[in-house]
Amino acid sequence: MSAQDDHEDLVPSATPGYKPAGPAKSADEYANMDAEDESLARWKASLGIVPGVAGGPATGPKVTVLTLELVSPSMPPGKRLHLNLQDPAQVQEFKKNPVTIKEGVEYNVRITFKVNHSIISGVRYLQVVKRAGVKVDKMEQMLGSYGPHPQGEAYTKNFDTEESPSGMIARSGTYNVRSRVIDDDGEVYADWDWSFKLGKEW
């Protein structure tokens, strides 16, 4: 598969009616816009956008992706598949040494991320899975709309439940995954590779 195919796979689908934003504004600027509109103020407050509770200045990445985790009720107690995306050594480890996912079980992907400034919308998680260079799966999940957390904490997003493939053929070989967090404007907040194998047990 060509680099062009890879690029096309990692472009999010268009949001109907979306128009690119103008220059970035801080959460405080958004909080003070249309301050007299009570219903709009309540909606902004639900996103954590209130006057005086702003993130940093409106420069640098709006989002920092912190972790990726695979979660399943079938995992044995104490077992975790958790990748710290802020640790380059761990990212390399997940790329070189495939993690084992049990075949035929339900699981979901969970990410934690921090909104540094401004308000985000149209931010998505994309995941393309290949085996022997051939695409076998693509997932695209919307993160939703968020502003900087009032206490500066990270947000957690659990994606829809999926089921891992099963059978002898599914268990053969390594699956290579490319994950990306990107917004409607094409700004990439995280982009990494990792790999997994399917097994009879976790």
Image (cartoon, grey):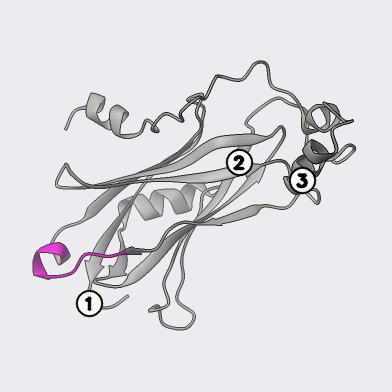
Dot 2 lies on which element? strand
Sequence-first disc among 2 and 3: 3
Vertical placement of 94 versus 49: above or below?
Answer: below
Instruction: Identify residue type, mark 3.
Output: Gly
> In the shown orientation, is residue 185 left or right of residue 136?
right
Q: Is residue 153 magenta?
A: no
**Helix, strand or loop at disc 1?**
loop
76 shown above or below 3: below
Q: Amino acid at mark 1?
A: Lys
Point out residue 93 in the picture as x, y percentages from the top left corner. Answer: 39, 54
Residue depicted at 67% across the width and 52% down the height: 154
Classify mark 3: helix, strand or loop.
loop
The residue to which callout 3 is attached is: 48
**Among numbered discs 1 and 3, the one appearing first in the sequence:** 3
**Front residue of 67 and 25:** 25
On the image, which quarter does residue 29 sit in?
Answer: top right
Instruction: Please give left or right for residue 190 compared with residue 165 in the image.
Output: right
- Callout 2 amino acid: Thr
Q: What is the residue that sits farthest to the left in this orientation?
A: 169
Q: Nearer the viewer, residue 30 or 62?
A: 30
Question: Is residue 166 within the magenta segment?
Answer: yes
The boundaries of the magenta stretch are 163-170
Q: Would you name the residue on which mark 2 appears? A: 64
Q: Residue furthest bottom?
A: 77
Camera-side mark, 2 or 3: 3
- The residues tagged by marks 1 and 3 sit, at their Cα atoms, a distance apart of 44 Å
The residue at which mark 1 appears reads as: 200
Residue 76: image x %, image y %?
A: 41, 82
CA distance separating discs 2 and 1: 35 Å
Determine contact: label 2, label 3, CB under 8 Å: no
Quadrant in which residue 24 is drawn: top right
The quarter of the picture where residue 106 lies is bottom left
